[in-house]
Image (cartoon, rainbow, N blue to C red):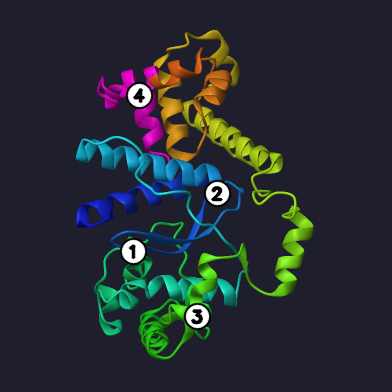
Amino acid sequence: MFAGEATKQAFERCLFEACAKSGWMLHAFVVMRNHYHLALETPEGNLVAGMHWLQATFATWFNRLRGERGHLFQGRYKALLVEEGAALGQVCHYIHLNPVRAGVVPAERLGEYRHGSFWYLGRPKARPAFLDLQTALSEAGGLADTPAGWRCYGDYLAWQAQTGPAGRNAAYACLSRGWALGTREFKVELIKEHALLATSRAWESEGAREIRRHRWEACLQRGLKALGRDPAEAASQPKSAPWKAALAWWIKQRSQAGNGWLAERLHMGRPEAVSVYIHRLLTADPKKNAEFRRLTTIV
C-alpha cells in the first residue's frame, strides 16, 4: 500500500490536512510499508469523522494513480483511548521505533527514516503547528525540545530498542486488543464519563457534533469579517456569488464542514451545488477573485 516514497509522502500530506481540518493534535506518527500508526489528540471528539475523511481522501488519490476502484484499507482502523502522561509517552516511543523493529533502519540511524514524526524532531521549523513532540520528550526523562534534548531522546530510543518495552513487540500486544491504555482509574473514569459500556463510540456524541458545528460557525464568522461581509448578505445575494464559493472553499480547507451546512448558512441552494460553485471558482483562475485572494492571506 505504502511501498513507494511518493505514496508515503502523499499519505503524510493527507494526514496533515486531516489534522488541520479536524483540529487534531498529533503526538506521533509513522508510515510503514503496509500500515501506519498515529497518536492523536482529538479536542473536538471527531475521530470517526476525521479518520473517514483521511482514509477516503487517500484511497481516492491512490485509486486514481493506479487506475483502480474499490476499498484500499482492509477493515476498520483500530483505535484505543490512551491516558495522557506515561501511557501516551510509551505509545509515542513505540511508534517512533517501528522502523527499527521492522529492520528498516538501525536505532542509531532512526533520524534518517523520513516518514514519521521522529524525522521532524531535529527539524522544528519544518513541523506543522499541530505536531507536538513534547509528550514523547517529557516521558523520556523530562527532556527539553532542544538539540541536547533531541540527542538524549535518540539515545533513549536506542536503549528502548535494545532492552526497553517499546522495542519489544510482545510487550505491546495490548496495542492490538482492548479499548484503552492507562491506569485502572483512567479506565473507570472513562466508563463513568462516556458510558462506554453502552457504546464503544460514545465520544462521537451529540455533544461532539455540537462542538464541530460551533467551530464551523466560528470559521464562517472569521471569514465574513475578513471579507467585510454581513451575514445578511448571504441571503440577499445570488446562490452562486463568487464570494460565497470562495468562502465555502476556505471553510472546507480549515474544517470538516459539509456541503449541507455550508449551503444552509451561505444560502447556496442544494448541498451538491456548493461543490459545483467551488469547482467553477477553482477552474477559472481563482487568483483573479479578490475575495479568494483576501481569504488566502489569513493565517
The reply to whether the C-beta atoms of the residues labelled 3 and 1 are less than 8 Å apart is no
Give the quadrant of residue 183: bottom right
For marks 2 and 1, the one nearer the N-term is 2
Q: What residue did someone put label 2 on?
A: 47
Q: What residue did someone put label 4 on?
A: 290
- Work out which residue is located at the far right of the displayed protein and give it: 192
Q: Is residue 255 left or right of residue 207?
A: left
- Element carrying mark 3: helix
- Element carrying mark 1: helix
Image point (52%, 19%), residue name = 263
Image point (68%, 48%), residue name = 202
Amino acid of disc 1: Lys
Q: Magenta includes 279?
A: yes
Q: Kindly report the distance in space between the C-alpha atoms of the residues bearing marks 3 and 4.
A: 57 Å
Q: Kindly report the distance in space between the C-alpha atoms of the residues bearing marks 2 and 1.
A: 27 Å
Q: What residue did someone put label 1 on?
A: 125
Q: Kindly report the distance in space between the C-alpha atoms of the residues bearing marks 3 and 1.
A: 34 Å
Amino acid of disc 4: Ala
